Image: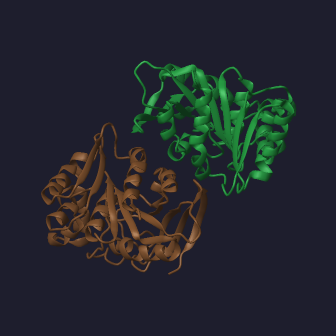
Chain colours: A brown, B green
Amino acid sequence: MTMQTVSLNTSYGGTQGVYRHASRETRTDMTFSVYVPPHADGSRLPVVWYLSGLTCTHANVTEKGEFRSACAALGLIFVAPDTSPRGEGVPGDPANAYDFGLGAGFYVDATREPFARNYRMWSYVTEELPKLVAENFPVDPNRQSILGHSMGGHGALTVALRHPDRYRAASAFSPIVAPSQVPWGIKALGGYLGDNKQAWRKHDAVALIEDGARLSDLLVDYGDADQFLTEQLRPELLQGACEKAKIPLTLRRQPGYDHSYYFISTFMADHLRWHAERLKG
Amino acid sequence: MTMQTVSLNTSYGGTQGVYRHASRETRTDMTFSVYVPPHADGSRLPVVWYLSGLTCTHANVTEKGEFRSACAALGLIFVAPDTSPRGEGVPGDPANAYDFGLGAGFYVDATREPFARNYRMWSYVTEELPKLVAENFPVDPNRQSILGHSMGGHGALTVALRHPDRYRAASAFSPIVAPSQVPWGIKALGGYLGDNKQAWRKHDAVALIEDGARLSDLLVDYGDADQFLTEQLRPELLQGACEKAKIPLTLRRQPGYDHSYYFISTFMADHLRWHAERLKG
């Protein structure tokens, strides 16, 4: 698999890169970013995957996420994929809404037409991109973790729950925890997967936990001034599922914070330290 | 003077605000951002002014500057103005170049037509905006400092050199130190001020130092991979002027860094700590 370098910038002693490649899964070019911290030649480093929210590309967290300082100090590689296929011929939301189609892949492999051809974000972020990254960057495949924001928090939780042996840690900012039960998720899962709600359960963190998936522990932050909190995010549903399943969940309600990168950046270093603890040795 | 709030976001325990007001100087609406760190009610805080570079608005540093973490820890207010007037009827570069007109006010009061009516960025950043900020935020007018990037580094140095009693500290990332001697500056100072090069000297840090202006000390960082280094920035001219004038200059050549916010954000906390030291008590 080949990729081309879009940009390289020295930052905090390491290198922030942006790369593009022709994706086999999405049948489009895909762009992603990788930060490699300062490190000794030949060493293999733990890698943290970051999945972004609705409307975002790799660029939002890369520019506004304030992760490089902590990644440089902790020796973490940080990878940020896009949130959907893009480009000529890729179908979007029929009404051009922000919450479906372009920028809103929801980390599923679509089975419904006309989306099934390109919307393969599940396979892209769990199979194709990890292989490409492993081939091109000094990652230690035994030390991987994942986090995400909002729709990407949904992605991070579902990916981690279905790959307990691959990701040593998972955390989220303001995640959509039960897409089957909230408007954003019902629209997206219905649109990409069709009406069979059984198929939705593999893309719903709360349903996965109810169906037996487990994580060793979990860190979730949300802001109590988040405009999407009560209708779309509903952290209490994750709390209930984790309690029942005895999954240790650290759920923090951050006073005054909203859904933006001003919130994410504030707690990013905190999350990365939590990940680094679990990626040791 | 009145202003309207464009947005408020909690970040690092403080508040990142964006504001708009009708400027008397530029005869346009002007937008700026202010970060207020967590603080006790009624306390007055030191304030750091940040002047941005070519093409930027307040938004670039506000989104990519990574200053809030350090400002919260050090108790600093951080103010970021725009770099030019904007809006209907404001003349720009005749050829739509990025280095003159909109986004390129160069922190001067233009005397040449058609720019004299709106391009009053010197008076805006040194008089009008400080008054507005003092009226609306808990700033301590006796503890102010200034920094900037590129064209904004030029702005920070010239503003500090001409107000030695107002700003206790000045620093810069990749500043244009001698605009009278480099293409960007010759175009801008000629375009805004006309051909009388005597008038340029008050907007040229090296010339101001030659003419007797002084600073108690100065911190300047630049990247050795900066594409503008040898033609536009020429830090050696500042070094020569400071040596002659016995101004203590800490001039740091940062290996591998370019002209971008990936560079600025890396050293932002460092600069803010340096400012905070000088803003004590």
The one of A199 and B75 positioned closer to us in this rendering = B75
Pick out the residue farthest to the front.
A281
User: Dividing the picture into quarters, in which one does residue A253 lie?
Assistant: top left
**Relative to residue B49, is residue A16 depicted above or below?**
below
Residue B162: where, in percent of width, then height? 74, 25
Determine whether, in the image, residue A227 is placed left or right of residue A58.
Answer: left
Determine whether, in the image, residue B88 is placed left or right of residue A233.
Answer: right
| Residue visible at 29% across and 60% down in the picture | A154
The one of A157 and B110 positioned closer to us in this rendering = A157
| Residue visible at 36% across and 58% down in the picture | A148
**Taking the image as drawn, is residue A95 in sight?**
no
| Residue visible at 30% across and 37% down in the picture | A255
**Taking the image as drawn, is residue A65 in sight?**
yes
Determine whether, in the image, residue B29 is placed left or right of residue B100.
Answer: left
Quarter occupied by the C terminus of chain B = top right
Residue A44: where, in percent of width, then height? 50, 70
The one of B268 and A249 positioned closer to us in this rendering = A249
Determine whether, in the image, residue A244 is placed left or right of residue A20.
Answer: left
Residue B179: where, in percent of width, then height? 79, 40
The one of B197 and B153 positioned closer to us in this rendering = B153
Q: How many marks?
A: 0
**Relative to residue A115, is residue B152 depicted above or below?**
above
| Residue visible at 57% across and 47% down in the picture | B265
Residue A185: where, in percent of width, then height? 24, 60
**Relative to residue B277, is residue A211 depicted above or below?**
below
User: Dividing the picture into quarters, in which one does residue A280 lie?
Assistant: bottom left
User: Dividing the picture into quarters, in which one does residue B92 lie?
Assistant: top right
